[in-house]
Amino acid sequence: MFEVVIGLEVHVQLNTKTKLFCSCATSFNHKQNTNVCPTCLALPGALPVLNKEVVHKSIMLGTALDATINRVSYFDRKSYFYPDSPSSYQITQLYTPIVEHGKLQIDFEDGSNKVIRVNRAHIEADAGKNIHDGDISKVDLNRAGTPLLEIVSEPDMRSAEDAILYLKKLHSIIRYLDIGDANMQEGSFRVDVNVSIRPKGDEKLYTRVEIKNINSFKFIQKAIEIEVARQSEAWEDGLYEQEICQETRLFDSVKQETRSMRGKEEAADYRYFPEPDLLKCVVTDEMMQKYTKIPELPDEKRERFISEYGMSEYNAAVITSSVETANFFETMMSEDGVTAKTATTWLSVELPSRLKGEVNITNSAVNAKKLGFLVKRIDDKTISGKAAKEVLDFLMENEEISVDDAIDKLGLKQVTDMGAIEAICDEIINANPEKVEQYQGGKEKLFGFFVGQVMKASKGSANPQVVNEILKVKLG
């Protein structure tokens, strides 16, 4: 039996307005090679100047990871050539990163948890983008010089599940801190996975394989599983040393395989040396005082929701898994008379089932205040849950109309008047004497028939609880 050893390197693009070492915009989706200047083109004589916002956001992340924030850190040159790197080197932090020795707790469905150590988070500049168009390759340098934080874990993960839980928690923290949009499809949250195996009980670290730039949690999980199977098979066949080497591989989601890209370089291959054009990075007392005051994080918010709203552990975890959902929920709960249980159901089940394509809870036609008011109308028995689904469908197509106006327009206000419901019950009972006799003779399942007929006659507007109470008396 083998034990899996996984370490992760995550590149997070920070959401600063300008690049790491110059004043060019970071909106790299503009026309190719328009957001560039002598500095990010690495022209002779152009010197880098560190963007303070990058330092501030690094402090926030370090605080969230309960890490050491180095008051003085340094930049280094990492030499390598790619067409989209105009300087033939990357400015990064090898020897003294701004953040190191952190930790991140992952939580399992059974209620247990595990702490994953974070080795470091260091600042570095992104490269540009190669565009392959048939037989022609082009280079767009709009992204060159965009600020990144590379967050490197220790090899503490022992399964694909561990890795995905770690990445989802880290992704959520980035979004809660609002230091990056962490959009995996657009490349602002890029993951490199380091995988190795070893016999159970062995403490030695064997040859690790790096799988580069995987852009979805689903593919990351699959890539790990496939690579572990490949290494395990090689070991069992006695071919581990021949087939498993330190290299960089890519994951082919179509062929469902990992494939060799290149041999993995060692640190000496990059010829690191201190960056001569930058001063040391100093974190001042003022910066520490201001940027260590961070927003409420997912774990803290989850615990508050449990205590404040009486939510279950599971529901609180679902709602706080993304900052957008958590904020949406809190806005719903600000409406008087809304219960957390009903709000959770309508936010996590009913609303998402109606969101399609590019529509999500941030741009939904039914915003948090409106959905909160609809839930209030369910909780105060103005409408039934079934009728509320019809109201929500109508509101999704008619953004300008209010909840109460939609209820009136659709004629779905719940009837609670005892006299009106009693009259409908009498009508149904008088129209079905044979079924009354059968019910009173012991066929208790027929009670549902009478309830259904009353609800049908009232077009779903009768309060079901009142209907049940009246029918029990009249049929008793």
Image (tube, helix red, strand yellow):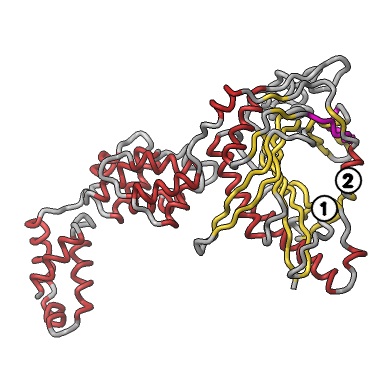
Q: Main secondary structure of the magenta part?
A: loop
Circle 2 — which element? loop
Q: Which residue is label 2 attached to?
A: 266
Residue 183 found in image quarter: top right
Seen in the image, is 172 located left or right of residue 138? Answer: left
Seen in the image, is 325 located left or right of residue 183? Answer: left
Q: Residue furthest bottom?
A: 441
Q: Marks 1 and 2: which is nearer the front?
A: 2
* Amino acid at the residue labelled 1: Arg
Residue 147: x %, y % from top left = 70, 30
Residue 10: x %, y % from top left = 70, 44
Q: Which residue is label 1 attached to?
A: 249
Q: Quadrant of the C terminus?
A: bottom left
Would you place residue 365 above or below residue 385 in this image? above
Q: Which residues are magenta?
A: 75-86
The reply to whether the magenta stretch includes residue 83 is yes
User: Which sits in the foreground, 387 or 90?
Assistant: 90
